[in-house]
């Protein structure tokens, strides 16, 4: 296990394989477990029949479990896409965060858990040159299938700690964009639209991550301003 400031408990999972030779680790992906507790999640993520895993699991009390070595390919993203890549697992380090999720009583992520997410993510970013624009949620890469970690996850707090991007408050709204123009800009940022019809699943995923207080309604000038800021930040502007 690489040197870490966080000292995880070892909970090895058999569910992994090798990354493709020469593939860079350049995505950090955050999930919620969608299960009632850490014990259930550990059982599933270590069950060979389930064929799912993650590199790390973080309980609500902040306990971190190491499950798959970072150099190996854990099985957490499923059918997914980001910026032209469909083997997201091959490029990503995945962190599962204990939370019941939308189907079982979605709730806020406690402070000890968020503190651990930040510390572990900072450790990972110190070892891997992951661009801020590629710190993602599961819903970003699988918007038609997934909602996690969802609108209650504090992405702004992560960005303030140097993990990922988050638009600042107070951006002046832009003119409301045409849906197709907004969709094209979402694609420029990285979102995919396979099976997404008019692109509403991707819009909702974008909002869950970058505008969590406004998940429904037509695309508007605030959406446009936030996405424009993200595109500029991702480009190094």
Image (cartoon, grey):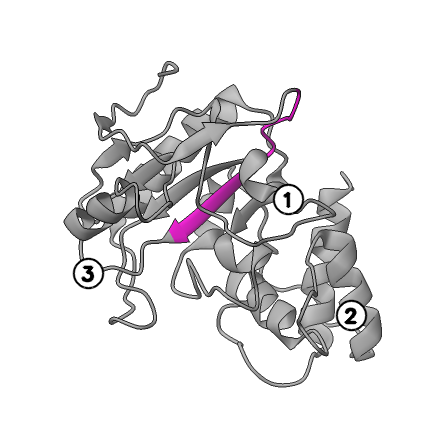
Gap in Å between the C-alphas at discs 2 and 3?
37 Å
**Which quarter of the figure has residue 187?**
bottom right
Q: Is residue 94 above or below residue 197?
A: above
Q: CA distance from mark 1 to mark 2?
A: 18 Å
Secondary element at tag 2: helix
Read off the residue under disc 2: 182
Circle 1/circle 2 CB separation < 8 Å = no
Magenta stretch encompasses residue 29: yes
Q: Give me the C-alpha separation between circle 3 and circle 1.
A: 30 Å
Task: Tell me where the magenta segment starts and ends, as one range.
Answer: 22-31
Location of residue 211 with respect to 8 vertically, above or below: below
Q: Is residue 221 left or right of residue 211?
A: right
Residue 175 visible somewhere in the drawing: no
Screen quadrant of the N terminus: top left
Q: Earlier in the sequence, mark 3 or mark 1?
A: 3
* Residue topped by disc 3: 36
């Amino acid at each position: 296990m690489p040197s870490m400031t966080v000292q995880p408990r070892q909970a090895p999972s058999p569910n992994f394989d090798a990354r493709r030779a020469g593939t860079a680790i350049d995505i950090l992906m955050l999930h919620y477990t969608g299960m009632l507790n850490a014990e259930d999640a550990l059982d599933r993520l270590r069950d060979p029949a389930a064929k799912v895993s993650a590199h790390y699991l973080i309980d609500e009390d902040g306990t971190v479990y190491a499950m798959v070595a970072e150099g190996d390919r854990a099985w957490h993203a499923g059918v997914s896409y980001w910026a032209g890549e469909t083997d997201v697992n091959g490029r990503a380090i995945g962190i599962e965060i204990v939370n019941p999720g939308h189907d079982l009583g979605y709730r806020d992520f406690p402070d000890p858990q968020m503190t651990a997410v930040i510390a572990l993510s900072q450790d990972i970013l110190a070892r891997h040159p992951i661009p801020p624009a590629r710190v993602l949620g599961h819903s970003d890469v699988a918007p038609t299938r997934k909602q996690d970690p969802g609108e209650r996850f504090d992405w702004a707090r992560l960005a303030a700690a140097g993990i990922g991007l988050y638009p600042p408050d107070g951006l002046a709204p832009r003119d409301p964009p045409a849906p197709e123009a907004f969709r094209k800009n979402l694609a420029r940022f990285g979102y995919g639209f396979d099976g997404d019809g008019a692109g509403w699943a991707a819009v909702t995923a974008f909002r869950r991550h970058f505008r969590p207080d406004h998940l429904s309604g037509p695309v508007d000038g605030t959406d446009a301003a936030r996405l424009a800021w993200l595109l500029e930040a991702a480009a190094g502007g």
